[in-house]
Image (cartoon, rainbow, N blue to C red):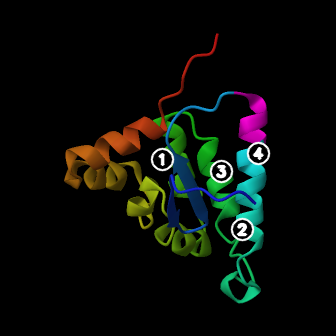
Amino acid sequence: MAAHDDWVFFAEDYWLVCASRGPFRSADDVTARIDEMLALIAAFPESMMPRTVDRSADDLAARIKNLDTIEDGIAFLQSLTPDDRQRLAKSDTPLALFWDVTTPEQAMQRFETLDVPTRLQILAMFERVDEA
């Protein structure tokens, strides 16, 4: 593995980000950087790695990803089981704020109590780029 004095790392949750100055000059440079990062990650002691990964919210994330409209979002909230609601409350999606909402009226009331950046974040969930 090559030594570098221009790397900066940022780690959060399950992400490890590496940034350095300047653009890559070729695809081989990108491949080399990925190889170096994988070697660096492999050097972490096993004791630092999680023994298990919590996948309990994966199905919720997949369902949320498929929401296209606000109406879909409200139908999603109405369809949640009590267990789904608990997992949603612990999730990092903007819809976590709506974990206890069961009616369209409650959804609108909750939405109206949110600050503008949070409202925009929720609305952005339903914006899709038209690829046609």
Give the structural element (helix, strand or loop) at label 3.
Answer: helix
42 displayed left or right of 116: right
- Report the residue at 51% width, 52% height from top: 6
Q: Amino acid at mark 2?
A: Ile
- 131 in relation to 118, above or below: above
Bounds of the magenta segment: 26-31
Residue 9, horizontal then vertical, whole percent: 51, 60
Q: Earlier in the sequence, mark 3 or mark 4?
A: 4
Q: Mark number for residue 63? A: 3
Magenta stretch holds residue 81: no
Residue 32, horizontal then vertical, whole percent: 76, 45
User: Which residue is tagged 1?
Assistant: 74
Residue 93, horizontal then vertical, whole percent: 48, 57
Would you say the residues marked 3 and 4 are in contact, meaning their CB atoms lie under 8 Å apart? no
Q: Give the CA distance from mark 3 to mark 2.
A: 31 Å
Task: Count every numbered label the image shows and give the total.
Answer: 4
Q: Give the CA distance from mark 1 to mark 3.
A: 13 Å
**Nearer the observer, 74 or 115:** 115
User: Which residue is tagged 2?
Assistant: 41
41 displayed left or right of 110: right
Q: State which mark lies toward you, 3 or 2.
A: 2
Would you say the residues marked 3 and 2 are in contact, meaning their CB atoms lie under 8 Å apart? no
Q: Give the CA distance from mark 1 to mark 2.
A: 41 Å
Assess disc 3: are there few (<14), some (14-19) or many (≥20) residues with their C-alpha within 10 Å of its C-alpha. few
Q: Earlier in the sequence, mark 4 or mark 2?
A: 4
